[in-house]
Amino acid sequence: MNLEVDELIRLAKKSNQQAQLALYDRYSAKMLGVCRHYIRDQHFAEDVMIGAFHKALESIQAYEPYGSFEGWLRRIMVRESISYLRVQKNKFDVVEVNEGHFYQKPNQDPSDDSEEIQMAIDALPVGCKTIFNLYVIEGYKHYEIAELLEVSVGTSKSQLAHARKLLQSQLSHLNSKNDASR
C-alpha cells in the first residue's frame, strides 16, 4: 500500500496529472474532514480543502518521505483552514464565552452520538473550537498553538478550558442517556 502511495508521489513530483488526481481521490474525503473540524460550512470547507490540495500539489517537491504523506497533507489543510478563518474574521478572534452560547433543541435525538458531538464542537465559538481541534484532535502543544495563531500560551490554555467546559455542559446528557440504556 505504501509502495503505491510512494509511486504516486514520485509521479506527482514529475507533474503527472493522473497521479495527482489519484492522490486527490485517495485523500480528499479525509482531508475534507480535517477542514470541516475548523470550518462549519461544508461548502467553504470544500473550497479550502481544494485550495489546500492545489497548494500541496504545487509544492509536492518539498515533501520528504521521512514522515507520512497524509500527515504532511494534514498540516497543510490545518494551516489553510486557519488562514481562511483569519481572512473571514480579518483577525483571529479569541473570545470569552459563557454558557449562553449553547442551546438544546427540543426533542433532539440524533441517531449517532458522534453527530451530536460534532454539532456541539461546531457550536463552539471560533477561537475555542480552533484551539480545541488543534490541541485535542491534531495533537499540537500549547506553545505551537500560540505561535500558529499568534496568541499567548495562556490564551491557548484558557480557551481550551472554556471549550472543554462548554462541551461537558452541552454533552452531559449523553452520559445520562448511555447510563439509562445499560
Image: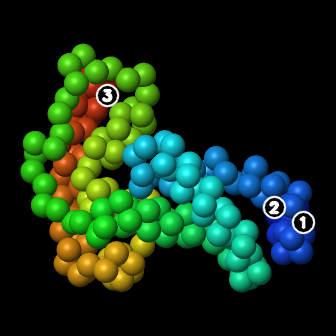
> Circle 1 is placed at which residue position?
16
**Which image quarter holds the N terminus?**
bottom right
Query: 10 Å neighbourhood of mark 2: few (<14), some, or many (≥20)?
Result: many
Q: Amino acid at mark 2?
A: Gln
Callout 2 touching callout 1 (CB < 8 Å): yes
Please tell me which of labels 2 and 3 falls first in the chain: 2
- From the viewer's perspective, tell me whether residue 162 is left or right of residue 129: left
> Circle 3 is placed at which residue position?
178
Q: Amino acid at mark 1?
A: Asn
Question: At which x and y percent is residue 177?
Answer: 27, 25
> Circle 2 is placed at which residue position?
20
* Residues at marks 2 and 3, CA–CA distance in whole angstroms: 45 Å
Question: At which x and y percent is residue 165?
Answer: 18, 52
Please tell me which of labels 3 and 1 falls first in the chain: 1
Question: At which x and y percent is residue 140?
Answer: 42, 72
Q: Is residue 104 visible?
A: yes
The image quarter in which residue 93 lies: bottom left
Question: At which x and y percent is residue 98?
Answer: 9, 51
Instruction: Name the residue at 21% across, 66% down.
Output: 94
